Image (tube, rainbow, N blue to C red):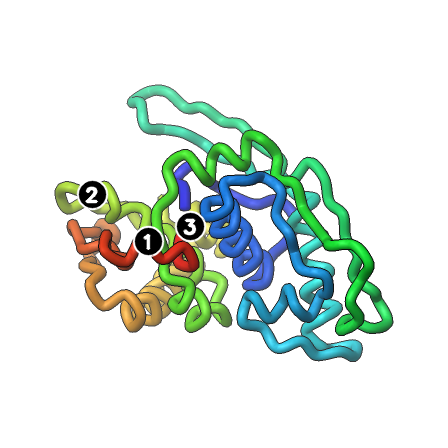
Amino acid sequence: VTELCEAIRGPFGSYPRLLLTWLCTEAAREKSPIIELGDSLSEFMRKLGLLPTGGRWGTIPRFKEAAVSLFSSAVSYVDRRQPGHEHRAQMLVADELDLWWIPNDPEQTALWRSTVTLSDRFFRAVTERPVPIDLRAIGVLKQSSMALDLYCWATYRVSYLTRETTIPWELLRLQFGAEYADTKQGRHRFKEKLLEALRRVCTVYEALRLKEGDGGLTLLPSPPHVRRAARKNAGRLL
């Protein structure tokens, strides 16, 4: 998780978020920008806790489309940590993509393994200061894009928080709900959705301390979701 990420240009929904979480986990665990996706699409999907189903409305075609879109995307980010200064940049998610998924039979094993090679800038961003998350929580929240975003964001923020910090509602809307209109009704609707998603996050991250106020959402110093003793479990790292 990194606080610099502002947006992924291209794919939307929970599938790209699940995939991005898994990619970052693998990069941090393997210490390599070359990530093996598995020798079949179904195997890869099962690694993310998804049930592979075919057909026009199945998970397989939608997931494959999301994967290709994500691997072809750029992440734009902004750094406003210094007062009066704003730094913007973007980085590609991947430099290379080799897919050997057989379209007519997703269970069929290919002769070569599918891989994605993360860009150097993206790889360094997700491995230099990784913050652990619990992939079981990701599995529970995977039906809600906003809940996934809020879980990863809150996990990162409280990892270094030393005092309570209030984030204005407007900044939260710009980060998590830019699609909501900048009107009284739009801002109210966004706040409702955000608080609903946060309630879901708190069901899996019970130690997360926060409070709602007129001026914004206040985060309080909280225990990390993955405690230090458990951080040796590489399957939970991001």
Q: Secondary structure at mark 1?
A: loop
What percent of the width, then of the height, locates residue 140? 42, 73
In this rendering, the label closer to the viewer, 3 or 1: 1
Report whether residue 189 is seen: no
Tag 3 near tag 2, CB within 8 Å: no
Distance in Å between CA atoms under marks 3 and 2:
18 Å
The amino acid on which the numbered mark 3 sits, given as a three-letter code, is: Leu
The amino acid on which the numbered mark 1 sits, given as a three-letter code, is: Lys
Q: Residue at x 50, y 40 (%)?
A: 31
Residue that label 2 marks: 161
Marked residue nearer the N-terminal end (3 or 2): 2
What percent of the width, then of the height, locates residue 2? 41, 41
Distance in Å between CA atoms under marks 3 and 1:
12 Å
Q: Secondary structure at mark 2?
A: loop
The disc at residue 238 is 3
Q: Secondary structure at mark 3?
A: loop
